[in-house]
Image (spheres, rainbow, N blue to C red):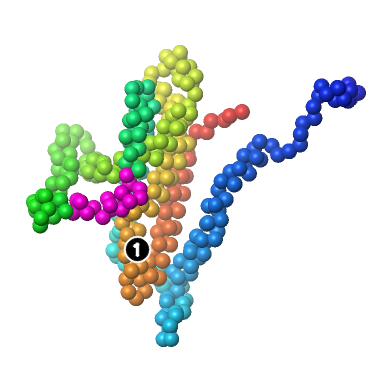
Amino acid sequence: MALFRKSAKDLGIVKERKRGASLQARKARTGWLFVLPFVLGFALIYIPIIYGSLKYSFNEIDILTGGGYELVWVGFGNYMKALGDSAFVETLLTGITGLIIDIPTILLFSLFIAILLNQKMIGRAAFRAIFFIPVLLTTGLIASIDASNTLGDYMGSTGEGIDTGAGASSGAAEIVSATDLQSLFSGMVVGGELATYVTTVVNNIFDIVNRSGVQMLIFLAALQGISPSIYESCQIEGCSAWETFWKITLPMISPMILVNAIYTVIDSFTSENNEVMAYVNAMYNQAGDGNVISSAMAWMYFLIVIVIVAAVAGIVSMFVFYQKKD
């Protein structure tokens, strides 16, 4: 056999396999090449900033007479002052409570829209672009204009604005109210908590649509990644659309539910409209020890975000199905 292989090699019938890196190794090197700018920027720019912020959170700044400053170690004193700030604690609890409402609402809405946009219909690409437009409108210069809300302030002002009504900023601007929903649910066995939840969701529908674009695209990519042969097998077996969704579609896209849940948590806690971050920035600009106390608040906020992300990832991971590909 060895003699035959040797003679075949001499005749050029059998070619030796070139030794080199495997396809997976080459892909790994290419991936590191793409993330190298971020790694260098993080190591050279962000890590020194993070270290400085952590150092300031455990110190007080003492301004010297001749100019400059020195750091005075106070341990967890800044953290105790931050916890003693009732406004910060209240804002933090409000943000966490709002997150409990936002996560399921955004995930359900983006999944619902992704399923609709995955259907075969005329103008499907146009509808996908329309639903993703809010994501583009909430970035860059347009996001800054929307955050300042200059036009809205002018239209609702009591001076020379278009609308001079005194109730422009009152509850009449809301789409629905809890009272209306309670009267609607009066004949049903529904508690007031559900009415409050639905009221909050409907009144924040604009913000929910704006923050669901990325999740919608991720769900849409996951839906398109499911093999059509699986759905054909379900039709042959006589499965209904309801059974197909719960037995096939939902388990197959469950990894993307985990990704979107984590993304939604981080996006909610780091958005420009986040009240906690706005309060931390306002504290930094206060005189006295506002800068070091704001650093302590930021690190406490960061640790809370990490704990919430870990909790969400742990809960959702219990229901994630990973398809084995041989």
Q: Where does the image place residue 58, in percent across and percent down from the top left?
A: 45, 71
The verdict on residue 143 being magenta is yes
Report the magenta stretch's main SS.
helix
Q: Nearer the viewer, residue 176 or 45?
A: 45
What residue would you read off at disc 1? 281
Q: Residue 135: image x %, image y %?
A: 35, 42
Outermost residue, bottom side: 65
| Magenta segment | 137-153
Observer able to see residue 1: no
- Judge from the rendering whether residue 163 lies leftward or rightward of residue 61; answer left or right: left
In front of the other: 18 or 1: 18
In the picture, the quarter occupied by the C terminus is: top right
Q: Which quadrant of the rendered structure holds the N terminus?
A: top right
Residue at the image position 45 percent from the left and 53 percent from the top: 306
Q: Nearer the viewer, residue 108 or 114?
A: 114
Considering the numbered disc 1 on the image, is that residue within a helix, a strand or a loop? helix
Vertical placement of 204 versus 306: above or below? Answer: above
Question: What residue appears at the point 48 percent right and 36 percent down from the top-left corner?
Answer: 255
Q: Residues within 10 Å of mark 1 (few under 14, many from 20)?
A: some
Residue 297: image location, x then y, percent: 38, 64
The vertical placement of 177 against 293, above or below, is: above
Labels in figure, total:
1
- Does residue 42 sit above or below 260 in this rendering? below
Which kind of residue does numbered mark 1 sit on? Answer: Asn
Q: Quadrant of residue 239?
A: top left
